Amino acid sequence: MKKILLYLILSIFIFSCGSSKKTTAKKRNNSKRVVVDKRTTNNETNNTNTEQNTNSSGSKTTYANPTEAYIANFSSIAQEEMQLYGIPASITLAQGILESGSGKGRLSVEANNHFGIKCHEWTGTKIYHDDDRRQECFRKYNHSKYSFRDHSQFLAERKRYRGLFDLKQDDYKGWAKGLKAAGYATDRKYPDKLISLIERYQLYEFDDEVLGNGYSRASTNTTRVSTHSQNNYVVKKGDTLYSISRQFNLTVKQLQKINNLSGTNIDVGQVLTIN
């Protein structure tokens, strides 16, 4: 009797275990597997070598690299500076590309400083950055166009660069070599780097536009001007912050705040934002 009872218990135990395994197996077979195509994911992640800029119409333009995007953004400003100061647009663009890392460097991103111009007698906003020495003082601008204007004035108002302006405006090779000879850069390959950029990206075409008949973005007058546009005012001899503020119905404090000025000193040729 005991043997019969033992056989019955063993039979029930074996039957219940088999039933449990079958149920588990069914559950596993019914679950879905999600397969990720790693090749597709990697391609999408690594496809970041193009630059996208949004133009005035709101549509995005894609460029092959940051340098081409930089040229598209700042070529018109360089051409305007060429008209006003006689510095080849190709040289200005090449210097901007080289000094700012095509607009990706810290000074250009955080301070709109495309040419690495240091403070010197600067009274505006400043930024500190490691260069030849730790935490050197650099100029900070409200807008990149003021950096381009400051670059033009930096070359035009210093005696050591005076000989450059005797060169033809389409002589980008002469300008590149002349900048190095005048002490603009210590890198002995600086002229070669500028010339290489100009020829690689055909920046000389922007010079040709200004010197030829195909350029009409601004006035054709190539002399330095002391006029104001709707938003800006170029300081002329005899101007003070007070006289300019009265002219445009502003207070001196308002002018200082708009232009990030800590004092009242202004220079002839300096561009002030007036609204």
Image (tube, rainbow, N blue to C red):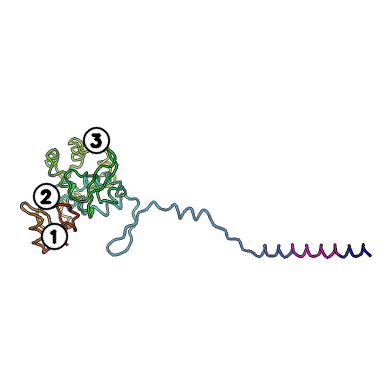
Quarter of the C terminus within the rendering:
bottom left
Asked which secondary structure carries label 2, the reply is loop
Q: For marks 2 and 3, give the CA distance.
A: 28 Å
Residue that label 1 marks: 229
Q: Is residue 12 magenta?
A: yes
* Circles 2, 3 touching at the beta carbon (< 8 Å): no
Residue 144, image x, y percentages? 23, 53
Name the front one of labels 1 and 2: 2
The circle drawn on residue 186 is 3
Most frequent secondary structure within the magenta stretch: helix
Residue 241, image x, y percentages? 10, 56
Residue 146, image x, y percentages? 20, 52
Q: Amino acid at mark 1?
A: Ser
Q: Is residue 61 left or right of residue 35?
A: left
Q: Give whichever of discs 2 and 3 has the lower sequence position.
A: 3
Viewer-side residue, 181 vs 257: 257
Q: Amino acid at mark 2?
A: Asp
Q: Residue at x 11, y 64 (%)?
A: 249
Quadrant in the rendering for residue 192? top left
Quadrant in the rendering for residue 37? bottom right
Residue that label 2 marks: 267
Asked which secondary structure carries label 3, the reply is loop
Q: Magenta region: which residues? A: 9-21
* Circles 1, 2 touching at the beta carbon (< 8 Å): no
Count of all numbered marks drawn on residues in the image: 3
Asked which secondary structure carries label 1, the reply is loop
Residue 158, image x, y percentages? 13, 41
Viewer-side residue, 182 vs 22: 22
